[in-house]
Image (cartoon, helix red, strand yellow):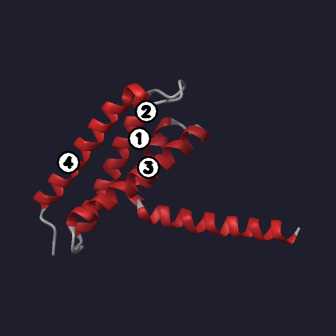
Amino acid sequence: MRPDIGQIRVVWLVFFLITSSIARAAEPILLLPDSIPAFQYFFAFALSIMGGAANGLKKWSSGFETKNVKISIASDAVSSVSAGFIAFFGALHYQPPSAIAVIAIFICAYGGSRLLDMLYAKSESFLSRKIDREAEK
């Protein structure tokens, strides 16, 4: 079943409304570091959503078919936000120029699950080598 553009818009809109209302409700109880303003978290989230939307629209415009449109969109949204926040916290740690941080967040969010799969494979091989070295001692 090929997704209808109306379904895609509705699911993205609902996802955005739910996440923004959750963020607004949690704002008084969030324990954010004082050095990072809350708008930076929202900005990283918005860039991640835009990157995920760009990836999803590219995928569906190239003839991608799925059995469940809502699950496909939710999967893309979660993976893009996760990858975007990995880039965001990496940028906070390494402190590149702002333009590079924005580009990194957007590209990581665009990569979404592909990026997360690559990071998982790299971390799994790194940890297994480290465990093997510790076992040899």
Q: Is residue 16 above or below residue 111?
A: above
Instruction: Give left or right: position of 8 versus 82.
Output: left
Mark 1 to mark 2 CA distance (whole Å) = 6 Å
The residue under label 4 is which amino acid type?
A: Val
Residue 100 image position (x, y, % from top left):
49, 43
Determine crowd level at label 3: few under 14, some 14-19, many 20+ residues with C-alpha closer than 10 A: many
Q: Quadrant of residue 96?
A: top right
Give the Cα distance between marks 3 and 1.
Answer: 7 Å
Residue located at (36% from left, 55% from top): 78
Earlier-in-chain disc, 3 versus 1: 1
Evaluate if marks 1 and 2 touch, with contact meaning CB atoms under 8 Å apart: yes
Disc 1 is placed on an element classified as helix
Give the percent coordinates (x, y) of residue 106.
40, 49
Task: Residue 132: name its quadrant.
Answer: bottom right
SS at circle 3: helix
Q: Amino acid at mark 1?
A: Ala
Q: Secondary structure at mark 2?
A: helix
Per the image, the residue denoted by label 4 is 14
The mark that comes first in sequence, 4 or 3, is 4
The residue that label 3 is drawn on is: 84
Q: Which label sits in the foreground, 2 or 4? A: 4
Name the residue nearer the viewer: 137 or 100.
137
Taking the view exactly as shown, the residue that stands out farthest to the front is: 29
Q: Which residue is painted at 42% across and 63% down in the image?
A: 113
What kind of element bears circle 4? helix
Circle number at residue 40: 2
Amino acid at pointer 2: Gln
* Residue on which the image places disc 1: 44
Q: Give amino acid for label 3.
A: Gly
Front disc: 4 or 1: 4
Q: Name which of mark 4 and mark 1 comes first in the sequence.
A: 4
